[in-house]
């Protein structure tokens, strides 16, 4: 599976992401879609996954795996900053 | 394991929750701690879990399981509202 099946969550309108996930499964026939987010967008990634799998693809798609991690880097002031990440793998039932 | 080992994430200072998780493992000798959150606090639950397991309890605690779900209810205006939830189970290695 390539990165084509990943949906990165940001600050576009919520339904854009839900539609993105749903279309990967329906139009593009994906077996798996990975919903990815960092920092404050993590809550939104969970919302997108829940709405896509429970409302739009109910009974057809379920959560296969969830991974959390964190990345540390230096910001522009040289301060060490840690940001959390999530990857939610949805799969066709 | 009782609900005593659960830490509910809200809008108190961030380090309160990290300390809460760390103390469950150290002072109270818990084998598992479940970090729970709803809605916008989900991102924070991931941050708390990452900081507790990677910075304060590095090599001693790891993520055992992550569950996401959602609850639907009627708000005060009678509108149906859906809220996402997360449960992150941390375990002693």
Image: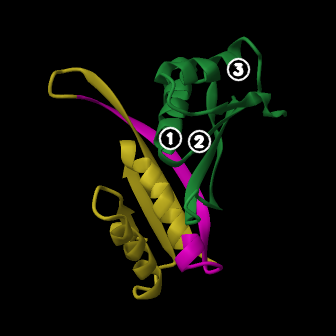
Chain colours: A green, B yellow
Q: Which residue is mark 2?
A: A37
Numbered tag placed on residue A41 in the rendering: 1
Label 1: element kind: helix
Other-residue count near label 2 (Cα within 10 Å), few / some / many at <14 / 14–19 / ≥20: many
Label 2: element kind: strand
Q: The N terminus of chain B appears in which quarter of the rendering? A: bottom left
Q: Which residue is mark 3?
A: A24
**Real-space CA distance between mark 3 and mark 1, rounded to the nearest whole angstrom:** 20 Å
Q: Is residue A79 above or below residue B78?
A: below
Between tags 3 and 1, which lies in front?
A: 1
Name the spot of residue B63 as percent of width and height, x first: 60, 64
Provide the residue span drawn in magenta: B53-74
Residue A89 visible within the image: yes
Q: Which secondary structure is most common in the magenta stretch?
A: strand
Image quarter of residue A70: bottom right
**Real-space CA distance between mark 3 and mark 2, rounded to the nearest whole angstrom:** 17 Å
Between tags 3 and 2, which lies in front?
A: 2
Name the spot of residue A23 as percent of width and height, x first: 66, 16
Q: What residue is at 41 percent from the left and 79 percent from the top?
A: B24
Looking at marks 3 and 2 on the same chain, the residue that comes earlier in the sequence is marked by: 3
Q: Is residue B89 above or below residue A54?
A: below
Name the spot of residue A76 as percent of width and height, x first: 58, 56
Tags 3 and 2 in contact by the CB under 8 Å rule?
no
Q: Is residue B19 above or below residue A39?
A: below
Q: What residue is at 24 percent from the left and 20 percent from the top?
A: B79
Looking at marks 3 and 1 on the same chain, the residue that comes earlier in the sequence is marked by: 3
């Amino acid at each position: 599976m390539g990165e084509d099946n990943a949906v990165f969550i940001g600050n576009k309108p919520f339904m854009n992401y839900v539609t993105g996930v749903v279309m990967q499964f329906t139009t593009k026939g994906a077996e798996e879609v990975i919903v990815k987010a960092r920092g404050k967008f993590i809550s939104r990634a969970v919302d997108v996954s829940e709405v896509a799998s429970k409302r739009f693809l109910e009974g057809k798609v379920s959560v296969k795996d969830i991974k959390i991690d964190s990345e540390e880097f230096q910001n522009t002031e040289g301060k060490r900053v840690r940001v959390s990440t999530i990857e939610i793998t949805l799969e066709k039932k």
